[in-house]
Structure formats: structure tokens, C-alpha cells
């Protein structure tokens, strides 16, 4: 069993500039400059930990390439692709992808193409049998980007571009996208909303971002009715709620859909230390969730599970969540364990939130619409 790995230094050169974390700085209005929350640090530290603990040597490193405009426009409008290029060409950066919170630095167009191209290379390697599964540690993230709008730090929807490539070039007709980033995978859902060949399943903190998005009743449209599932978990949801959602919604949906490929929008921002959400997952949670998804991929599609890094903003804790994920993906263990396990054990005593059961049960009911 071989796990592919995509990383490239250019991913760290996507410049999200200074801001007050999320918002552009505005000193006279009292909005002090600070490093942007979507900065290279957490992702750099993930790569460094993977290398320092020796796991890199267990992975098949796959070189990314830049997605072509033709590959991008399977998902995005030509005008939007051009918009990103225009913003990226601005000398001195300072561009935006469309919602005012998605910085486009000078040269970010080519870096975002390299992120989407990294996913394309990974799914290609899986389809050719060179790897069983894989992980693309890419930046900028993608799951909020719709066909014609950048959003939530996302420029091109890396997962969606890879899904369409898998269908068009690799003979993988049925693609399932599981998104356990803390925020709703609205872009991926919108891109495939009327398409029954791509099942999207998003587990996220209810109403966190985008605002008023990702409710259970968002279940696909037209021919795609039934092929979008949402589990909007209340703030404070942790291990028990997420594992229940995986067992009661994700696994039954994958069984019914019988995908040729499973793509994972792999955000780690549902971890207990993340600044942009209020969920309470720990590294152990990601380990267990990954184990279940690897097992489903083995049963359903020859182990073909390809993950794209999305959110995850805690520089010190994201690496341990990513390492736990990657150990399960590769079926190996390293000498590194979560040094904060004892700390988090103290305060991830997850409150039982009755609403969690209702949300999970409502989504579980919709699974039978998948045929
Ligand atoms: C709404 C709103 N209004 N305003 C003024 C601002 C600053 C708003 N939120 N921006 C956000 C909030 C959260 C994210 C998370 C992205 C992620 O991690 N995705 O996976 C992105 C942008
Ligand atoms: Zn997120």
C-alpha cells in the first residue's frame, strides 16, 4: 500500500498579506495590521513535522504541476479564472478573489494553479495504480470557491477541479467528496449541486462560514437531488458527535453511492485549538475518522482516497492532527504522539447537545435518496 504526497515550497509563497486576522487592516479605524490567519505557518509546520518524524520517507512524493486553464474551466468560468490572473498580476499584490476576505497576492494565480494541479497529479497517480491513496498539502485552499466567486481564502476549488479531471480523463465516473473542514464546503456543493455523478457530504460547524450556509435541507437540485448532504453540527461538537455523523451519515451514504474515487476536503480547523471555529476535535479524533474513511475506500474503491488540505489555523496543534491523519492513511506509526493529549483530555469532555442527534438523524434520513 503506497501513499502519495504533494507539497511544494511555492504553496508557502501565496502571500495573504497583513490583515487583522481576517479583515484588511485599517489603522485609522483602529483595525491594527497583523499576519493574516490563512498564512503559511501552520502548513509549513505540518510539512516540517512529517519530514522531521521520518514519515516523509514512507511516502511517494508526487511533483505537482500547474493546472491548465482548460482544466480550471471544467469548474470555473473563464471570466473568473481571468479575474484571478488580473488580481495576481497587480504589482505589490493586494488583490482579492471576490468576497473581500480572499487575498490574491502577486503571483498567487500560478500558485493556485499549482495547488489544483497537485490534486490532479495525485488522482492521476491513484487511477494509474502508482499509489493507493494520497495527501496534497496545498495552499491556497479551495472548498469555498464556486464556479465564479472566490470566497473564504479560496481561489480555485482544488477538489472540484480534481473530480472533473478524474471523470473526464481517468474513467472514474462516480466521485464522492467528504468535507470535514469546520466550515461548510459551499463551493464544492454549488459546483456539483445538480449533478448525481458527484456526491458531496459536508460536516461543519452550523452557520460558521459562509454565514447561513450548509443546512440539512440543502440536498441538491434537479438531477442532483439527494446527492448533497450537510451535517451542520452545533458549536462545541467534538469526538462523539463527529464519529456519530461519520457512522450514521457518511459511511451509509458512501455505501449507497458506491464511488470510484473518494476525495476528502481535509480541513483541520475543527480541532479544539483552532481560532476560526468552536469545535472540539483532537488529534485522536482525526485518527479515528481517517481510519473509518480508509476502511470505506478499501471496501468501495480499491483504497482510492485522495485528500486536499483545506483549513487549519493553529500553528502548534494542526501538525499533530495532520500527523494522526497521515499515520492512518499510510498505516504506519511514528515516534511522535500528540503532546497535548493530556491537556485536551481535560477539557474536551464534550457536552451532550441534544440538537446534535436531531441534525445527524435529519441528514441520515436523506441518505436513502442516494441510488
Ligand atoms: C462573514 C464575514 N463578514 N466579515 C466582515 C468577515 C471577516 C466574515 N468572515 N470571514 C471569514 C470567516 C471564516 C473563514 C474561514 C475559512 C475557512 O477556514 N474555510 O475552511 C473565512 C472568512
Ligand atoms: Zn475551514
Image: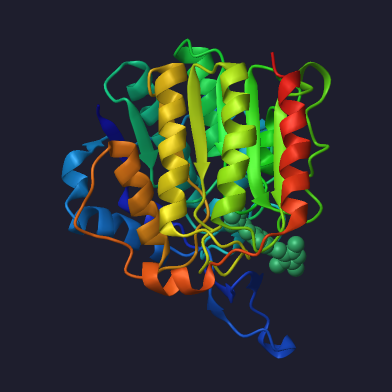
Identify the residue shown where x is 60% and y is 63%: 350
Q: As drawn, which residue projects farthest toward the top? A: 171
Q: Please name the residue shown 41% across and 55% down the image.
A: 284
Q: How many marks?
A: 0
Q: Quadrant of the C terminus?
A: top right
**From the viewer's perspective, is residue 100 above or below residue 5?**
below
Residue 243 screen position, x and y as percent: 55, 45
Give how far across and how far down residue 201 sits, in percent. 64, 35
Return the residue nearer the eye: 151 or 59: 59
Q: Is residue 169 above or below residue 5?
A: above
Image quarter where the N terminus lies is: top left
When the figure is inspected, residue 7 is found, relative to residue 349, above or below; the finding is above
Residue 299 sits in quarter: top left
Q: Is residue 35 visible?
A: yes
Residue 357 appears left or right of 278: right
Give percent across and percent down for residue 246.
57, 39
**Colour setup of the view:** rainbow
Above or below, comparing residue 100 to residue 265 in the picture: below
* Quadrant in the picture for residue 252: top right
- Work out whether residue 101 can be spotted: no
Residue for point 62% across, 51% down: 241
Of the pair 311 and 63, the residue shown nearer to us: 311
Residue in view at x 53 percent, y 41 percent: 265
In the picture, measured across the screen, residue 160 lies left or right of residue 108, that is right
Residue 364, given in percent of the width and then of the height, sits at 72, 33
On the rendering, which quadrant does ligand 1 occupy?
bottom right
Amino acid at each position: 500500500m503506497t501513499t502519495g504526497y504533494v507539497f511544494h515550497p511555492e504553496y508557502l509563497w501565496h502571500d495573504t498579506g497583513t490583515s487583522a486576522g481576517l479583515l484588511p487592516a485599517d489603522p485609522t479605524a483602529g483595525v491594527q495590521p497583523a499576519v493574516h490567519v490563512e498564512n503559511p505557518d501552520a502548513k509549513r509546520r505540518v510539512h516540517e513535522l512529517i519530514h522531521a518524524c521520518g514519515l516523509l520517507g514512507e511516502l511517494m512524493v508526487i511533483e505537482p504541476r500547474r493546472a491548465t486553464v482548460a482544466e480550471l474551466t471544467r469548474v470555473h468560468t473563464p471570466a473568473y479564472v481571468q479575474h484571478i490572473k488580473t488580481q495576481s498580476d497587480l504589482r505589490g499584490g493586494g488583490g482579492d478573489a471576490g468576497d473581500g476576505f480572499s487575498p490574491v497576492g502577486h503571483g498567487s494565480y500560478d500558485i493556485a494553479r499549482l495547488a489544483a494541479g497537485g490534486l490532479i497529479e495525485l488522482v492521476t497517480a491513484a487511477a494509474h495504480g502508482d499509489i493507493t491513496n494520497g495527501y496534497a498539502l496545498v495552499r491556497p485552499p479551495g472548498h469555498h470557491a464556486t464556479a465564479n466567486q472566490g470566497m473564504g481564502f479560496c481561489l480555485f476549488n482544488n477538489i472540484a477541479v480534481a473530480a472533473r479531471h478524474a471523470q473526464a480523463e481517468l474513467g472514474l465516473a462516480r466521485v464522492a467528496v467528504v468535507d470535514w473542514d469546520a466550515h461548510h464546503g459551499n463551493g464544492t456543493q454549488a459546483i456539483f449541486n445538480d449533478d448525481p455523478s458527484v456526491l458531496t457530504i459536508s460536516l461543519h460547524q452550523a452557520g460558521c462560514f459562509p454565514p447561513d450556509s450548509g443546512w440539512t435541507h440543502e440536498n441538491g437540485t434537479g438531477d442532483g437531488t439527494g446527492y448533497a448532504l450537510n451535517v451542520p453540527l452545533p458549536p462545541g461538537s467534538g469526538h462523539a458527535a463527529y464519529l456519530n455523523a461519520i457512522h450514521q451519515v457518511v459511511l451509509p451514504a458512501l455505501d449507497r453511492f458506491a464511488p470510484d474515487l473518494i476525495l476528502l476536503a481535509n480541513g483541520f480547523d475543527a480541532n479544539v485549538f483552532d481560532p476560526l471555529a468552536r469545535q472540539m476535535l483532537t488529534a485522536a479524533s482525526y485518527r479515528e475518522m481517517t481510519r473509518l474513511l480508509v476502511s470505506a475506500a478499501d471496501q468501495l474503491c480499491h483504497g482510492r482516497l485522495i485528500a486536499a488540505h483545506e483549513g487549519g489555523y493553529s500553528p502548534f496543534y494542526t501538525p499533530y492532527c495532520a500527523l494522526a491523519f497521515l499515520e492512518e492513511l499510510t498505516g504506519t506509526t511514528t515516534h511522535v504522539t500528540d503532546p497535548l493529549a493530556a491537556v485536551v483530555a481535560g477539557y474536551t469532555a464534550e457536552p451532550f447537545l441534544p440538537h446534535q442527534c436531531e441534525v445527524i438523524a435529519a441528514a441520515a434520513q436523506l441518505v436513502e435518496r442516494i441510488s
